[in-house]
Amino acid sequence: MDQKIALIAVIALVVAGVGAFVLMSPAEELTGDTTPIRASINGVDYTWEEMLANMETKTVNGDLGVSLSALINDSSLANPDTLQYQLIAEDGYFKNVTWGNMMNGILFQTEVDGNMTLITSFPTLSTRYMVKFLADITPITTDLITVNGREYTWDQPFDRMFDEANVSGNIGIRLSDLINHTDLANPDTHDFKLIASDGYNKTVDWTAMLNGVLIKDEHKCAFADLATSFHVKDLVAIEIV
């Protein structure tokens, strides 16, 4: 009888061990940590499992994840399209993105250095915006430039999105590269209105855009062959004419 009881006890322990193995999440298998992976979205705490179960999913750059805009909308933020968003990692690293980026981007779970982590991904931003070990997404306001209807933070065009150019000693990114990034068809058939925050504006052709640069520090543009009156400061928009 004692042998039967002992055998039953051993079987029960084995079954329990197998069950625990089956129920382990990928993070637990890698680290032994049973704490759910989570992040704060506009002050609302979510586990990865909650996000995946309740939010819209899509694929970006080959990775399946949860829509970032769906997360913000679920947090009940009013007028999310009027704000920008700071993506903050556990170590304090951060990147600022627009609502348009949030609509196109995802949050997904992956392994980094043997640990499971949440990471952001965007179809049109550099890999610097793949914030690993994401801890928090906070609504903010920051300076923007709108190009052909598409919003950019002032950091984004200079963050490995385009090659740097030097035009008559003015170092920045080519205005033509920025326009091409908006997928404007036949840009050489258009003119471009450069608009400052106070309404001052100048209109230039495509040749000027090819030879002009956007300068980050002064929020202005400069051209190789145009008068300085065309070097619009406090630039907030480039419209297609």
Image: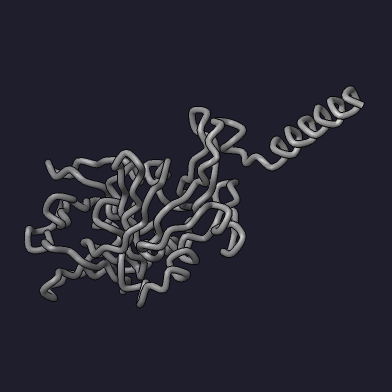
Most extreme residue toward the front, as rendered? Answer: 1
Q: Would residue 116 be visible to someone looking at this image?
A: yes
Q: Nearer the viewer, residue 139 or 150?
A: 139
Q: Residue at x 43, y 58 (%)?
A: 45
Residue 224 % position (x, y): 16, 50
Quadrant in which the C terminus appears: bottom left
- Position of 120 compared to 7: left or right? left
In the image, residue 79 above or below residue 177: below
Most extreme residue toward the top, as rendered? Answer: 3
- Position of 182 compared to 213: left or right? right
Q: Residue at x 53, y 52 (%)?
A: 48
Residue 235 % position (x, y): 17, 64
The count of marks equals 0
- Position of 98 compared to 218: left or right? right
Residue 60 % position (x, y): 55, 52
Residue 184 % position (x, y): 42, 64
Q: Nearer the viewer, residue 139 or 122?
A: 139
Q: Residue at x 27, y 55 (%)?
A: 175
Q: Quadrant of residue 226?
A: bottom left
Q: Nearer the viewer, residue 102 or 166?
A: 102
